Image (spheres, grey):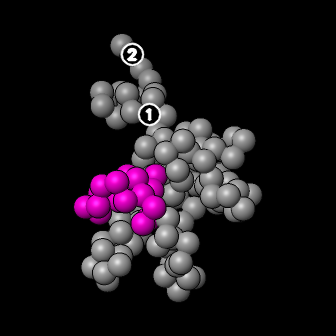
Amino acid sequence: MTDERRQRIVDVIRALGPGEVSTYGDIAEVAGYPGRSRLVGHILASSTDEDDLPWWRVVNAAGRLVPGHERTQASMLRAERVRVRNGHVVSAPEGRFRRASARQQHRTGRTGDHG
């Protein structure tokens, strides 16, 4: 893997903010490597603490948490107001798993008052 490819993927992962949950595939696509979700997983799996990547904000397309790290990942996500149930992200304030009602409020600019 080239350093440029790794760096582009790392930059996308680092850009994920609190409460934002993304998938391996989405990260690959934004980085310019559509269809390379496994590459994203490989980069995360081989990262070190010094890389300082917010790995807990990345899940598979079904919202499943990282096998073997579910408890830690769920705790970190919940601290960012992400709803997790049975090892899966249910909803998040930002990103792919953002709640439908939050999306609608964002598009319309409304905060719940329908009048």
Give the mark, 2 or 1, whose residue is nearer the N terminus. 1
Q: Quadrant of the C terminus?
A: top left
Residue 92 seen:
no
Q: At 52% across and 58% down in the image, what residue appears?
A: 57
Left or right of 5? Residue 95 is: right
Q: At 29% across and 61% down in the image, what residue appears?
A: 33
Residue 55 painted magenta: no
Q: Quadrant of the N terminus?
A: bottom left
Question: How many numbered circles are shown?
Answer: 2
Which SS does the magenta portion mostly show? helix
Q: Is residue 47 above or below residue 103?
A: below
Q: Could you tell me which secondary element the residue under label 2 belongs to?
A: loop
Q: Is residue 13 above or below residue 24?
A: below
The x, y position of residue 103, in whole percent, is 39, 33
| Mark 1 lies on residue | 102
110 or 104, which is in the foreground? 104
Near mark 1 (Cα within 10 A), the count class, few <14, some 14-19 or many ≥20, is some
Q: Which mark is residue 93?
A: none
Q: What's under tag 1, amino acid-wise?
A: Ala
Q: Which mark is residue 114?
A: 2
6 or 100, which is in the foreground? 6
Near mark 2 (Cα within 10 A), the count class, few <14, some 14-19 or many ≥20, is few
Q: At 25% across and 61% down in the image, what residue appears?
A: 32
Q: At 48% across and 41% down in the image, what residue appears?
A: 97
The x, y position of residue 66, in whole percent, is 63, 58
Q: What's under tag 2, amino acid-wise?
A: His
Residue 30 seen:
yes
**Residue segment shown in magenta:** 23-40
Dividing the picture into quadrants, the one containing residue 10 is bottom left
